[in-house]
Amino acid sequence: MARGLGNDLRHAVRALARSPGFSGVAVLSLAIAIGANTAMFGVVRTLLLTPLEVDAPRELALLTWARDGEFSINQVGSTSYTDPEGGRAYRSNFSYPIYTALRDAAPASVELFAFAFLRGVSVAVEDQPALLAGGALVNGRYFSGLGARMALGRPLDDEDDAPGAPLVAVLGHSLWMRAFGGDPDVLGRTVRVNGNPAEVVGVTAAGFHGLSMGGFFPQTEVTVPLAAQPLVYPRMAPGRSLVTADDVFWLRLMARVPEAADQEPVEEALTRAMREQPSPLVGGDGNLPVVRLLPGAQGAQPVHPETARLLYFLWGVVGIVLLIACVNLASLMLARGVSRQRETAVRRALGCGRARLVAQVLIESLVLAGAGTALGLVLTLLGRELLGGLLTGSLGTGAFGNVDMRVGLDPVVAGVSAGLGVAATLLFGLLPALRLSSIDPGAWLRHRAAGSATPRLTLSRALVGLQIAVSVPLVVGAALFLRTVANIGAVELGFDPSGLVSFQVDPGYTRLPADQYPRLHQDLLARVQEVPGVRSATLVENALMSGIVSNTSITVDGRSHLLYLNAVGPAFLETMGMRLIEGRVPGLQDGPDAPLVGAVNETAVRELFGGASPLDRVLQLGGRDVRIVGVVNDTPYRSRRDRVPPTLYDDALQREGYGGHHLVLRTDVPLGRLEPIVREVVSSVDTDLPVPELRSQAAVMAQTSARERVFTELLTMFGGFALLLASIGLHGVTSYAVTRRTNEIGVRVAVGARPRQVLWLVLRQVLALALAGLAVGIPLALGAAPVAGSLLYGVAPDDVPTVVAASMLLLAIAAVAGLVPALRAARLDPTVALAAD
């Protein structure tokens, strides 16, 4: 049996080697399709399917709560979760007194622990420049409750979280490598966490990144006790400790519930405890909070449902590409099998059974699938950084952050790839095998003698039509996103982005008193402007078109309005390249002790003041009066997609206690050369002040439209590949049809048919096949387009001109694919054609 299988394999390899063009197309198309599916599965698995690298992650549950009716609470860093079963929205944060009440009320088998994400923490080692890291405040049960593993040292415990205990820290593995180069003697060393000395007592294992997948709250790289909140992160509640506050909801809670335990009694016990605890949620309106345990195996800050939906959509796209590749090969193998009918008929006449013939064709398919799968794995390894980088860049802000997006070939991913190869084998190999092995040798020889042994290609045509049909949604989607990118790029900016570079500075990461923040910003501006090549510099609360905005409710003449805010510093207009319509903007003359002033944009003039000049008008903002001193031109704020909102540009140096601003530079110096100079300048002002990555304004703007750009790139690439496969299939089937009809064409030419008539005879069949595919594919495209409709801009998912343009492109490509065999048919010599066998 083994010898027979070996002979079959050798025969299959020789047969495929005799058709290098067919074999090359088969292997390469399968490799691209399988590689794309394997890589995409790796991304989906990393972000959506892989649990935390802790002990028994399925036992972890996230504590959330919901309450009907209206209520008002002070929340810090809250997240809304949707119950996957009932669809109800639940909130994430609790106060510290509620946490202790729930902890005490939890059953003995349930371990409850608390933590709070920190968006940024300054970590400095000796006299080195400070690093910016994601952080977390945790209680003493955090690490034991999670079952997190340590690479070095020990986790935090209850003694570390006691009031007055010395400040200690656990470093994440990535920060350990960044700050200490993986030095095993890091334990016992001192780091400054937001300017406060802390002893390093442990380093977490490489696979543990905390409870956030990234995004708004980055992955955790440094962990300190909850009790250290007033010292390490006083900005959460200036002048007070949140450990004793009952009116601020700032803690997230998780529980480890044994898998055998019933969660309903646990939820009931926790709900009773929360209702018994005095809080703003227990009022007189009769509505009471309900505690709900949600799945916590992937942490407390998983990928946003919208992002997950888009990832699954992309996975579906590459699945369509694989289907197209398989259908294409099935149609080509059907056509190729016709040329082997004589061989098959002879083998059947000599007694070869049908099962044997099916096995032989399937072995050929298996060889192709094996080669395609192997090459697909190689392409996965080569392209994983590209795909991971594309998706991280496109979905990183607000979705993934610094998630490790590398697609490794672990057993699961490799198994999925092998499974795709086997499925492809069955899909494109079985049907041609059954069709070819069904030949009746006697009937075939009789038809051969009569000159009609060549069968019609009805099934092959149907498969090519199917290819075209499933290609239509990809081509239409690519066209819609191309228009979206063009529409976004055409939006008027209102400022000059060339030469702008920005980075964030936040004195809150240091121990500097809040009343010294303006002086620090002024020192930074003065020193940065001395850097050669820097023409001007300013402060901006939120970088323009960075995806982040600030807004609040203000009062004008007794009427309330929603107004967007962006604090700015001196030389704002000059640095940004914006226009002053009238008056002036805040400058150095408006110091911290001067009356509050601000400038508004043109939209605010229209919507708040009816188009009249707002100069010297007063806004009531947070209990303070702000006098309007100028009007500037409109610019997009959050992104190009959003309409320009009414915006107030107030004075950054007058923002009491607020330090989180961006320094924006207009410079001629290349970014790579500028960055080390700027870092040195910032470190000279305060060694505990971290400098995140410097980014050009072009990079900032590209980030906010990255999802649209990447969807465009991927859909265009996969749509082009689908069109290529469809054209190959159409060309192959048309070429065989011309061969099959050689005698007929010879007769037509002999009786006077002109070349253009023969050309049209072939092309009209090609176009009819393409039109049939479009008739099925256009409804598919219109039905699928709304899935990604939220990413479109300036074009509707069912935009008729776009669908028509994509259809015309498909018809043109179909015509080109059929043109070569059609021209060959038009040039046939009738004497040769009539003599053809």
Image (spheres, grey):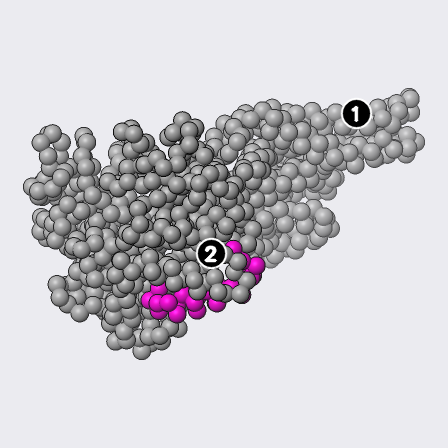
Q: Quadrant of residue 751?
A: top right
Q: Nearer the viewer, residue 537 or 209?
A: 537
Mark 2, secondary structure of its residue: strand
Is residue 199 shown in magenta?
Answer: no
Circle 2 Cα neighbour tier, 10 Å, few/some/many (<14 / 14–19 / ≥20): many
Q: Is residue 487 left or right of residue 583?
A: right
Picture coordinates of residue 281, whole percent (x, y): 14, 38
Q: Quadrant of the C terminus?
A: top right
Residue at the far left: name it: 276
Compared with residue 572, is residue 768 higher up or lower down, i.e. above or below?
Answer: above
Ranked by sequence position, the earlier of labels 1 and 2 is: 2
Q: Residue at x 33, y 57 (%)?
A: 518
Q: Nearer the viewer, residue 217 or 589?
A: 589
Q: Write down the region rendered in magenta.
A: 666-689
The secondary structure that dominates the magenta segment is helix
In 3D space, how far apart are the residues under numbered discs 1 and 2 (Cα atoms)? 70 Å
Compared with residue 20, is residue 167 higher up or lower down, i.e. above or below?
Answer: below
Q: Quadrant of residue 679?
A: bottom left
The residue to which callout 2 is attached is: 537
Q: Is residue 11 left or right of residue 658?
A: right
- Asked if residue 367 can be seen in this view, the reply is yes
The residue to which callout 1 is attached is: 761
Picture coordinates of residue 83, whole percent (x, y): 27, 38
Q: Residue at x 40, y 56 (%)?
A: 504
Mark 1, secondary structure of its residue: helix
Q: Nearer the viewer, residue 203 or 238?
A: 238
Query: Tag 1: residue type?
Result: Leu
